[in-house]
Image: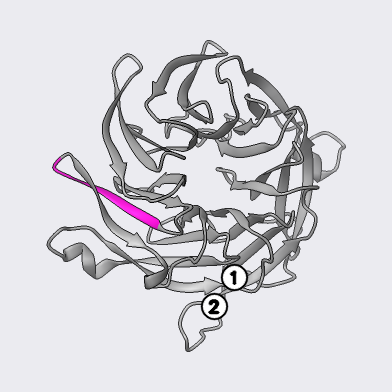
Amino acid sequence: MEFYEGACELKLLQTLEGHTDRVWSLAWNPATGTADTPLVFASCSGDKTVRIWEQNPSPSSSSSSSSSSSYSSWNCKAVLEDTHTRTVRSCCWSPSGKSLAVASFDATTSIWENVGGDFECVSTLEGHENEVKSVSWNASGSLLATCGRDKSVWIWEVQPGNEYECVSVLQGHTQDVKMVMWHPTLDVLFSCSYDNTVKVWADDDDDWQCVQTLGEPNNGHSSTVWALSFNKTGDKMVTCSDDLTLKIWEMDGTSMQSADGYASWRHLCTITGYHDRTIFSVHWSSEGIIASGAADDAIRFFVEDKDGLVDGPSYKLLLKEEKAHGMDINSVQWSPGEKRLLASASDDGTVKIWELASLCTGNGY
């Protein structure tokens, strides 16, 4: 689908309140959002809790209400509490949607499962020296990665009976590691850090090692890298930074045939001049729309500029929501499923659900 400026509008569907401190992170359950399974997401906060939110079933089409009410309201279905003693910084659902991993500043990561309608903590992972900042499952759900202020990245193998075995502790970053994320199809792990780099980790005969560092010398960021996200096919990646830019990276297909078999990544272009405060979050939708959330309280949307510039690929601003929240935006996440929904989390303690609607057709699809 071709997108152009002025062709979309962002509708606020609902503001969700309940957290009593800043909301750090959001995670949509990937197994929800189908015809018979309502959308579910988790939010985590400085109030030491995780909240599980579920979309109410849509009212029947025969109701006399307006079409927008088919985006029914959201309810908090559960509060996961009394487990962590400090801020809950990050959460991530397993690919099956059955397990939720929760990373906390108390140096632990908890694993939760929905057992007969109630969420139970089934495992606690210990090992980091201090704050755990991020957690991520690989595509098959067999590996879990965590990272933290102790500059390390841990890889855990899922064992039967809710056991998790640490198979590798990766030392390579020189500062606080802000985020870990697995590639959507390959067992390759990416981490970004306060040391201004993104590191790529791969397994060589059960020996995990850093196979590439994306830093300032190879057109990388000049300040803290806060987050990264992959496009649908996994051949491109976007990173966001304290240096006020987004950078697009491309997997070099030719390197797959190289001796070590690891694809290398190269800088494609830099999206600059749109942000004047730190960009904390970025997420690439399945349709190719990049959303960013920043310290200026705004959400921005970018798409590839298809006008065929001679200089190579470039991206343009599709839309900017000026005051999307009252304070810093820490996380923006596109929902799974057909609807073009985005959730945002902020220091103002709220989560907001948005719909990016296309004006040409009226309903956004």
Determine the residue positioned at 39% across, 23% down: 126
Q: How many marks?
A: 2
Residue 91 appears at what percent x and percent y? 53, 33
Q: Residues within 10 Å of mark 2 (few under 14, many from 20)?
A: few
Hey, which quadrant is residue 90 in on the image?
Answer: top right
| Residue at position x 40%, y 57% in the image | 198
Residue 114 placement (x, y as % from top left): 51, 17
From the viewer's side, name the closer residue of 48 and 63.
48
Q: Tell me the quadrant of the picture where the N terminus can be found.
A: bottom right
Q: Nearer the viewer, mark 1 or mark 2?
A: 2
**What label sits on residue 2 in the rendered view?**
1
The amino acid type found where label 2 is placed reads: Lys
Q: Is residue 79 above or below residue 173?
A: above
Q: What residue would you read off at disc 2?
A: 306
Seen from the viewer's position, the closer of residues 176 and 280 is 176
Side (left or right) of 350 relative to 292: right
Q: How far from the left and from the top, in percent, is residue 255? A: 22, 67
